[in-house]
Image (tube, rainbow, N blue to C red):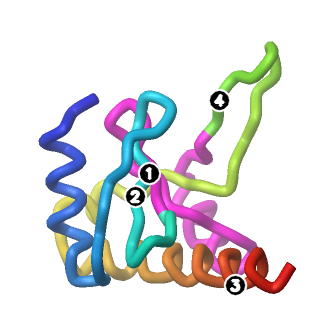
Amino acid sequence: MNAPFVEHLLELLRPLGRIQARPMFGGYGIYCDGVMFGLVSDDVFYLKTDDVNRPMFEARGLACFRYQKQGKLVRVAYYEAPAEALEDVDEMARWALPALEVARRAATKRQKR
């Protein structure tokens, strides 16, 4: 894992709030104010999606995070951040803020259960 890459992401994301990276499954979960909204795997940054923001990722042809489990391909609701977001704070915010909103909505739903 490229620790400088994760540090670079943390700097880009810092304007969103209290940003942390926590090791998980050989990668990192990216959290804002305690809510996970991104993940890093093999030096690729993925952002959380739902029906609201997923179309903007799909329109760009960005890849969904996938992994193998018991011989089956599992897709999760995280999509690759576009390259330009990795180079610019404002562009990162344009993609990361909706992902953070998705994560916060999901956390609120979990708390209500």
| Spatial separation of the CA atoms under disc 3 and disc 2 | 18 Å
Mark 4 vs mark 3: which is more N-terminal?
4
| Spatial separation of the CA atoms under disc 1 and disc 3 | 19 Å
Q: From the viewer's perspective, is 33 left or right of 107? A: left
Q: Amino acid at mark 4?
A: Tyr
Residue at the image position 50 percent from the left and 32 percent from the top: 25
Residue 87: in magenta span: no
Q: Amino acid at mark 3?
A: Thr
What is the secondary structure assignment of the residue under circle 3? helix
> Which residue is farthest right?
113
> Which residue is farthest top?
71
Q: From the viewer's perspective, is 31 left or right of 15? A: right
Crowd class of label 1 (few under 14; some 14 to 19; many from 20; radius 10 Å) = some
| Spatial separation of the CA atoms under disc 2 and disc 1 | 4 Å
| Spatial separation of the CA atoms under disc 4 and disc 2 | 18 Å
Crowd class of label 3 (few under 14; some 14 to 19; many from 20; radius 10 Å) = few
Crowd class of label 4 (few under 14; some 14 to 19; many from 20; radius 10 Å) = few
Q: Which residue is mark 3?
A: 108
Q: Nearer the viewer, residue 63 or 16?
A: 16
Mark 1 vs mark 3: which is more N-terminal?
1
Q: Amino acid at mark 2?
A: Ile
Residue at the image position 21 percent from the left and 33 percent from the top: 2
The image quadrant of residue 26 is: top left
The image quadrant of residue 56 is: bottom right
Q: Which residue is mark 1?
A: 29
Q: Which residue is mark 2?
A: 30
Number of numbered tags placed on the structure image:
4
- Image: magenta residue range: 38-65
What is the secondary structure assignment of the residue under circle 1? strand
